[in-house]
Amino acid sequence: MDRYAVLGNPVAHSRSPWIHAAFAQATQQVLSYERVLAPMDDFVGTVRRFAAEGGAGCNITVPFKFEAFALCPRQSERAQMAQAANTLRFDAEGWWADNTDGVGLVRDIELHGQRPLQGTRVLLVGAGGAAAGVLGPLIAARPSALRVVNRSPDKARALIHSHQAWGDQHGVSLSHGGLADVEAAYDVVINGSASSLSGGAIPVPDRVLAPGSLAVDMMYGPAAQPFLDWARAQGAQARDGLGMLVEQAAEAFWVWRGVRPQTTQVLADLRAAVSATPPQP
């Protein structure tokens, strides 16, 4: 039986084992999937031990996505663009690093959110690892314009600079600025900042949303609730990160197994399970 796992710190909260068990059952794949807590000072050793013990691949969560990318001699284009990896595959050809976060976000917005991104105006809030992981696939969806804003404008500038050629290739107008440097409403606003994790204030002014806009927080559960409540108060459609979680997992499943699972029912079941889970103290 092929072994897979999610590695991170913390990792006990991860829904990935449940998701991949559902995918395996639906596609009649025989595998196991577990959680592995990686010590903060021994991520590399943890990955190597898991692979040596027969692991076929793993997902990587915070805070190790940059280390995971550097660990692999073979890397997908989307991992190279993000300089971060959330999916590793171990096979006869060596270790392979990929990043499925961005394609997961785009598929959730377009499939489950029913919002085609082509020709829209997109605002991406944040310029850290989460934003870096999704920017390339967002550009590939061909919005007309995409702006990255961040508390530190220099980080937003660097992220846009690293993706400028990709933006030119796809005909997307890219720009950057600080959190308050927005003068118009956007069709889609994506929160990839640390504000939800830290319980901070809404990072951007109300004017970024027009009635009917789509606002997406990459987090889910109680962490995402303030952003979602704010978006609804502005007349926007609010969406949390559960769909992104399921879709990035489906892409990882395809990377490992060559089979693409259906996600609609898995997402519905997961959303029901999350809603029924009591808040953590």
Image: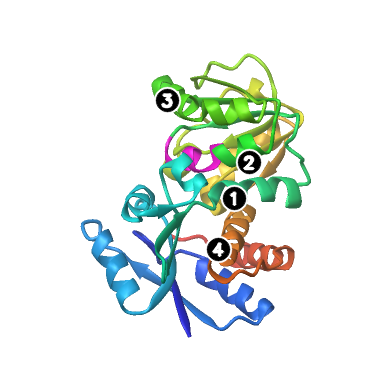
Precedes in sequence: disc 3 or disc 4: 3
Precedes in sequence: disc 1 or disc 3: 3
Which amino acid is tagged 1? Gly
Precedes in sequence: disc 4 or disc 1: 1
Calculate the distance from the C-alpha at mark 3 to the C-alpha at mark 4.
29 Å
Which amino acid is tagged 4? Val
Q: Would you say the magenta stretch is mainly helix, strand or loop?
A: helix
* Residue mark closest to the camera, 3 vs 4: 4
Nearest the viewer among 8 and 259 is: 259
Precedes in sequence: disc 4 or disc 2: 2
Q: Which residues are magenta?
A: 128-135
Do labels 2 and 1 touch, CB within 8 Å?
yes
* Residue mark closest to the camera, 4 vs 1: 4
Q: Can residue 194 be found in the magenta stretch? A: no
Which amino acid is tagged 2? Val
Residue that mark 1 sits on: 241
Q: Is residue 74 visible?
A: yes
